[in-house]
């Protein structure tokens, strides 16, 4: 079943519900639409599955009911520069669940959609489990990401106000000078993430841990460390390091923690369907079925 759902800002988002209707429902807010042709080939150069959303759904639908949508893609098409707050993201997710008649559900999100899941978990009792990939549940790098998103927004504004140039766009990671890359993105698209991190800058992710009783999984690739150049504030976002440092404490708090090993297991590789499904599917079956 597919349905277009109107969110609080008036924008419409396509949502799918498929799989085993008698089983647990998994919310997948990062289920991207498949792309083909040259766009797909470009994504493959970056190690990105161009049909990731489809593969996630197909990989889980035999055991679970899947509530899927591309919230990130939606927010790039319909930016919410002043209103992408944790409360509004939560309200969007609960509106989607309500419109699809889903009362209880598990949640899987990666990167900023992982932190969105944590914000959802502290605002509703409708979650049956929480899976966070690529963003740690305690000591989250909110301040570092505030710096990065502010710098990205500044560059987007500068580019918007300057004449367009004809520099060739690099199509593979090896071709990019990460210290000098120019941001070519709509300012409203970047400002919404500034808004989100501004609203999280004083968030204490330790204080909210004790009430949790639902099963929780957190994971990251062992090479998930991004060192940003001067253009992005000269900060380091060390997801793997934070997770490894806090592994014992997280397990004491009831989290299952996995640091994924393997060649090139960085932020991008650890989010691909073949990697994630091999981890979350058996975890879900063990904890929910």
Image (cartoon, rainbow, N blue to C red):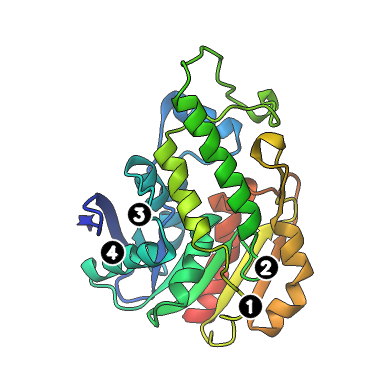
Query: Which residue is more in the foreground, 9 or 24?
Result: 9
Tell me the element at label 3.
Answer: loop
Identify the residue under disc 2.
Answer: 139
Mark 4 and mark 3 residues within 8 Å of each other at the beta carbon: yes
Identify the residue under disc 1.
Answer: 206
Q: Residue at x 46, y 75 (%)?
A: 121
Using the rendered image of the protein, determine whether residue 184 is visible from the camera's viewpoint: no
Identify the residue under disc 4.
Answer: 96
Mark 2 and mark 4 residues within 8 Å of each other at the beta carbon: no
User: What x and y, as percent, mark residue 260?
Assistant: 71, 59
Total tally of numbered discs in the picture: 4
Q: Against 226, is 45 above or below?
A: above
Using the rendered image of the protein, determine whether residue 57 is visible from the camera's viewpoint: yes
Residue 69, numbered circle: 3
Tell me the element at label 4.
Answer: helix
Mark 3 → mark 1, Cα distance in angstroms: 29 Å
Task: Nearest to the eye among marks 3 and 2: give it.
Answer: 2
Mark 2 and mark 1 residues within 8 Å of each other at the beta carbon: yes
Q: Answer few, some or many: residues within 10 Å of disc 1's Cα (few below 14, many 20 plus, some between 14 and 19).
A: few
């Amino acid at each position: 079943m597919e349905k277009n759902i109107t969110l609080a800002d008036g924008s419409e988002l396509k949502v799918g519900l498929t799989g085993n209707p008698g089983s647990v429902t998994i919310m997948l807010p990062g289920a991207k639409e498949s792309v083909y042709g040259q766009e797909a080939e470009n994504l493959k150069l970056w190690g990105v599955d161009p049909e990731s959303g489809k593969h996630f759904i197909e990989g889980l639908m035999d055991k679970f009911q899947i509530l899927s949508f591309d919230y990130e893609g939606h927010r790039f098409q319909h930016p919410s520069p002043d209103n992408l707050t944790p409360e509004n993201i939560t309200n969007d997710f609960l509106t989607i669940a309500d419109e699809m008649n889903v009362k209880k559900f598990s949640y899987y999100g990666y990167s900023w959609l992982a932190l969105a899941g944590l914000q959802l978990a502290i605002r509703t009792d409708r979650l049956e489990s929480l899976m966070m990939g690529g963003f740690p549940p305690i000591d989250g790098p909110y301040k570092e990401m505030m710096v990065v998103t502010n710098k990205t927004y500044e560059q987007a504004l500068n580019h918007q106000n300057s004449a367009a140039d004809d520099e060739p766009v690099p199509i593979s990671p090896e071709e990019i000078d990460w210290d000098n890359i120019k941001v070519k993105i709509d300012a409203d698209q970047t400002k919404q993430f500034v808004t989100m991190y501004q609203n999280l800058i004083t968030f204490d992710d330790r204080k909210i841990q004790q009430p949790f009783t639902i099963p929780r999984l957190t994971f990251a690739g062992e090479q998930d460390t991004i060192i940003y150049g001067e253009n992005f504030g000269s900060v380091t976002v060390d997801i793997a390091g934070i997770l490894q440092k806090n592994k014992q404490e997280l397990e004491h708090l009831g989290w299952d923690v996995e640091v994924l090993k393997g060649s090139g297991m960085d932020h991008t590789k650890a989010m691909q369907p073949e990697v994630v499904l091999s981890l979350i599917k058996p975890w879900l079956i063990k904890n929910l079925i």
